[in-house]
Amino acid sequence: MNLGEIYRWVTDQAIGYAARPKYHIYLCEAGWRADGHAFLFINKSNYGSDYPIKKSDYNFFPLPVSYISCSDIVTYSDFEIKKINPQRLGVLSNAHMVELYSAIASSETMVQWQIDLVCDALKAAF
């Protein structure tokens, strides 16, 4: 997996749901604070200061506008990813990764170590 790749699979990590399909953006290995690989969810609603992306830029999204979560990362181990066997749908553009970097850097809901992790990963798009 590479930075910015967009995937969709059923996950049990969406708050309030036993399992549901979710879009994910791959970031990087999660490091020592969390096991596995770090992703951001893409949601159909803005839950506060999330980053908007448009169907016109990524035609596989079902809605005119979707939102990249700027409040939390989600992680999956190598074993979980292998079991899920995710299918890559596309890649977030470098321009959008740069804008996402700014949105994450100014997040008031994401904890600082996650902000640092995400921003360090997104620097590769500069």
Image: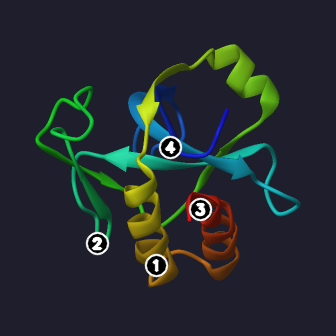
Residue at left offset 88%, top offset 60% = 32
Sequence-wise first label, 2 or 4 = 4
In percent of width and height, residue 44 lies at 23, 45
What whole-number distance in Å separates the C-alpha atoms at marks 3 and 4? 11 Å
Instruction: Identify which residue, 59 or 117, lies in the foreground.
Output: 59
Q: In which quarter of the image is the N terminus?
A: top right
Total marks in image: 4
For the residues labelled 2 and 4, say whether their Cβ atoms are less than 8 Å apart: no
Residue carrying label 2? 48
Callout 4: SS: strand
Callout 2: SS: loop
Residue carrying label 1? 109
Inspect the image, locate mark 1, and give the three-letter code of the amino acid beneath it. Answer: Thr
Sequence-wise first label, 3 or 2 = 2
Residue farthest to the right? 32
What whole-number distance in Å separates the C-alpha atoms at marks 3 and 2? 21 Å
Quadrant of residue 50 in the image? bottom left
Q: Which mark is residue 122?
A: 3
Would residue 34 appear left or right of 52 to someone viewing this image? right
